[in-house]
Amino acid sequence: MNSSTSSSRGRWRGFVRTFLLVAAGMVVALPTLALLVDPYDSGRSPFALKTGVRPQGPRTAAASRGRDPAFAGAIFGNSHVQLVSPEQLTQQTGIPFVSLIAPATGPRETLVLLDWFLRHRKEPAKALVIGVDARWCFADADLPVNRPFPFWLYERSPFAYLRGLLRFDVIEESLRRLSYLMTPSPERARPDGYWDYEAGYEAQGYVADPKLREALREQVDISGYNLTGHFPPAIALRELLERAASDVPVVLVRPPNIVTALPVPGTAGADADAGCLNAYTKLAAERPRTALVDWRVDRPENREPDNYFDHTHYRRKIAVPLTADIAAAIVRLR
């Protein structure tokens, strides 16, 4: 073997060794950076960092909002309670509210966020508002998840959290977090979590498109067809409230639907819907300081197509009186 070949192999081995060392260093350094800068303001950094997070989706922003000591009440659910205004609730109840909704989520995600909020209160929460739409009516005890959700971010286990940091999107967010922390007055995500979806729906043509308006007249069934009489989400919610919020006022909300999304009397859908309603009516009746606000009924507001974008997403014309009903229920429970 000539000296040039031996030298070439030596250089190659040196390159591979250096590459592996650098790669190993990055594997350690990047998660360490994420731990220190706390990309979603979860409170797990050893340092005292700037409050809040940059504008981002509610799935991750809820980590910061949910532990904010400025709030004593919270709204939970998906886009079907998204227009319930924390500011209006605050004005009408005197309780500072935050919205911890996350679109396209169900009971499992809501219970995780509810637990996060409750365990970050130095004083007991003063009120909880929980949207229980059709996804709370299913019989699957596994509480299935339809879309990705960062469960690792809300884990009690520090090891599960550390494993969650080993993600490319988390590393990207850590770099953005550095910019947020180093900027004197950075743009911050709205602290109370309110997110008005009206402009988005209007941009998609839900107000102007005649076909989309006409679709509101078509009958749909979103009852879930659970005729078992068994509702695992209601059981899981009851257990969590008993464990972590035994004396906290709770308002359960059945969100509004346009009348064509209500079940037709005499059908299996109507029986399933009645069974689900009974489960949450019973929870509200048996748990102290609990009320059910049911807007999934045939009422004048739900007969007006101009109050809706689609069968289940309503406009502020409905959100304002709905929020007032919730506030009134909270006041009665105090």
Image (cartoon, rainbow, N blue to C red):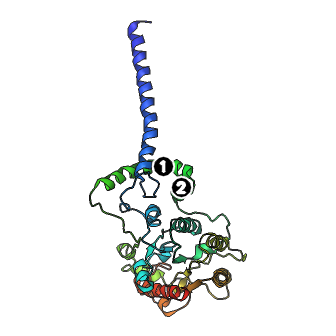
Quadrant in the rendering for residue 253: bottom right
Q: At numbered mark 1, what does the secondary structure look like: helix, strand or loop?
A: loop
Residue 64, percent from left and from top = 43, 63
Q: Residues within 10 Å of mark 1 (few under 14, many from 20)?
A: many
Residue 20, percent from left and from top = 45, 30
Q: Residues within 10 Å of mark 2 (few under 14, many from 20)?
A: some
| Vertical comparison of 315 with 77: above or below | below
User: Foreground: 150 or 204?
Assistant: 150
Pick the quarter of the image with the N terminus.
top left
User: Foreground: 242 or 296?
Assistant: 242
Name of the residue lying farthest toward the left: 184
Asked if one can make out residue 315 in the rendered structure from this viewpoint, the answer is no
Q: Which residue is mark 1?
A: 165
| Vertical comparison of 116 with 28: above or below | below
Q: Which residue is mark 2?
A: 152
Q: CA distance from mark 1 to mark 2?
A: 9 Å
Q: Residue at the location (53% across, 62% down)? A: 147
Quadrant in the rendering for residue 144: bottom right
